[in-house]
Image (tube, coloured by chain):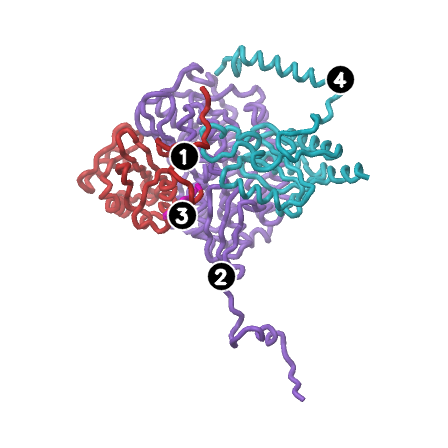
Chain colours: A purple, B red, C cyan
Amino acid sequence: MNISVSSLERRINHGICGEGPIATEEYFINMGPQHPSTHGVLRLLLKLDGETVREVIPVLGYIHRGIEKMGEKAGYRQFVHLSDRIDYLSSLMNNWAVSMVIEKAANIELNDRIQTVRTILAELQRIQSHQLWWGVLGMDLGAFTPFLYGFRDREKLSDVLEKTIGARLTMNYIQPGGLMFDIDSDFVKDVKLFMDYFKPKLAEYETLVSENIIIKERLRGIGVLDAKSAVSLGTTGPVLRASGVMYDLRKSEPYGMYAKTAFEVPVGQSGDSLDRYLVRIVEMRQSLRIVEQLIDNIPDGKYFVMKPAVKIKPPEGAYYSHVETARGILGVFMVSDGKGSKPYRIHLRTPNFNNLWAVTAIAPGWRIADLVAIVSSLDLVVPDIDR
Amino acid sequence: MDASELISTVTTIRPGISQREKCNRPSVVIESVNLLDIMWSLQSREDLGFDMLLSHTAVDWIDEGWFELVYLLYSTKHGHYLMVSTFIPRESPVIATVSPIWKIAEWQEREVYDMFGVLYEDHPDLRRIFLDDDWEGFPLRKDYKDDFMLERPE
Amino acid sequence: MDKIINWARSNSLWPLTFGTSCCAIEVMMAAGASRHDLARFGAEVARPSPRQADLLVVAGTIVKKMAPRLKMLYEQMCEPKYVIATGSCAISGGPFMYHSYTTVRGADEIIPVDVYVPGCPPRPEGFFYGLLMLQKLIREGETVRKPRMRKKPVLAALPPGLTLSQIQEEIRMELETVTKRGLFGGRI
């Protein structure tokens, strides 16, 4: 009789010719345009070796609506409402970018009231955008509570903005020449109430998520983007500042009322996901500080400096101006041919385009769950990439 | 450096660089054959140090028959901006790629190819980025005809 | 028996997480969050997989590249399935209807739609109105399979003392005043 006792390892290797370990090969998996944790319709092709990501290939174009071509047929004023819809979480700042380039081109001078109100609204919008980012980051990492907390506070801010502006998401309020309507009489009181409400909540956010050991371990050291790659990839905003490069338009080329307010800009050290997270939390605090300094001293004046029916006709030439939105630098490049009230060419330099391609540089080597944390910490809004 | 000093320094790099008029930022025009050499000098020289390519786009001047390619550069060390334009003929739009210098140029140039049809020499991966691979035509050209697009009735 | 089944179906619609652009924030995320709570209508369980969902909420612009994926998602859902088109982009192309070379003018060019919720983006309360109308449709046992064809007009319940002709009269008068004095009362 021939009896021999086998083992599990021998049983597995039995079906495979040769004596070596199990053969593996790399394969492509599609993280498709409809997926619960990509922020919009972003398709990522992942080249996987087991569960480790070897290469990430983003495929774009699932929300490409041709806004730049539409800008050539729409007039200068009509382009402002289209700019709302590219990065809809910072729509007031997008409006400001387009209005700024038209005002610089046509030499329209603004008064202090308009600049102060624009600055306050931009900072409130920054807080609102970061609230949503914080909620979605928690949700992506598996925790549903930050999502509910973030939205609860975001709704309070949406109420304040809605009383003045009329809309919750696509604002279309900052126009070339001023504002669409004057601010509400309750605006100052409401903003102060919101700030008193939100300051302890921000401390609560820190205790809930920033001090949480699971979130910290899932973000620390993951997806390190060093300063040289970050600059070569053209990333801007919190992603660049977390890698150690200090580049913030509010400090280097102040516009609006930023030159007259005192605030700090956080800069990270190592460029990992935890730094990107902490930079945004500190930015929220500094935005509250800016609003505090400006909200009591809104000067009087007109809210729209020209006659409303005037057709804007910038002289011939190429113009470029940019603002610092919640995600990076939004630049508007406009070429006008001097005749007519439509731009000859208008191009938007969007922050998320550059931030997206950083994924190809920092994701290889990490697992799929880390990839989700990396994409969430980069804070992408996909219609901004595709325009 | 401020604007006039920057322009005077840049125009001395090579002959054939001139200032572009009618622009609200310091801007120069260069010849398309010298593009790669000038871009390497702009990036590597200590006093200029343009290490970030903020944006790259194109303008279709159909009446004159040129594409104008615009590169917007920024230096994180010195904090100054420069806009570099170059003109290439519309019938044969070929130009060198700057992706060895700045990594993001690879995808910015894919976008310009997709929208205008500008071809880049030695590009590592030249294919469409926003539209389907089998899309015909280049949408942002001024003579782009499309049956699908709806015109607004006046 | 049908009545009980329809009542059960209408009160436990499971939406599919499908949001392409701005409407996704308002209609899907804000409606599911703490202030406007989608869970009280039974629609809390938002499934990412189309095999497990029965309500497709089209929130956002549909472009030509995304259209075949939308059709594939719709076909993968099991019967009975319902579709709500929210936002003006999903109804008719929205702000991108003219001069855009990729935007599909309305989700109903691709899949049959049961309820349309207008707005840009619609408020979460507006979306709930559409959801309640869909629940009423289901309870009455009728949904639309062919776009733009309906057996009889269906309204969600009007408050007492108000009739449809009153609402139509009000809308007509508002349109007249707006065309006479211009938008924004001549301020812009």
- Is residue A167 or residue A127 the one in the foreground? A167
Residue A49 against residue B37 in the figure, above or below: below
Is A76 rendered above or below residue A277? above
Q: CA distance from mark 2 to mark 3?
A: 28 Å
Q: Amino acid at mark 2?
A: Glu
Q: Residues within 10 Å of mark 1 (few under 14, many from 20)?
A: many
Say whether residue A191 is visible.
no
CB atoms of marks 4 and 2 within 8 Å:
no
Query: Where does label 2 land, which residue?
Result: A26
User: Is circle 4 on the same chain as circle 1?
Assistant: no
Name the residue rendered at 54%, 55% in the picture: A368
- Quarter of the image with the N terminus of chain B in it: top left
> For the residue labelled by badge 1, is the local secondary structure a helix, a strand or a loop?
strand
Q: CA distance from mark 1 to mark 3?
A: 20 Å
**What amino acid type should be assigned to the residue bearing mark 3?**
Ala
Mark 2 falls within which chain? Answer: A
Overall secondary structure of the magenta section: loop
Instruction: State which mark lies toward you, 4 or 1.
Output: 4
Q: Are marks 4 and 1 in contact (CB under 8 Å)?
A: no
Bounds of the magenta segment: B126-131
On whether disc 4 and disc 2 are found on a single subunit, the reply is: no
| SS for dot 4 | loop
Rendered residue at 52%/16% (across/down)? C183
Q: Which residue is mark 1?
A: A348
**Residue count near mark 2 (Cα–Cα under 10 Å), binned few <14, some 14–19, many ≥20:** few
Is residue B127 found inside the magenta-colored segment of the image? yes
Instruction: Please state, as top left, top right, bottom left or bottom right, where the C terminus of chain B lies in the image.
Output: top left
State if disc 2 and disc 1 touch (CB < 8 Å).
Answer: no
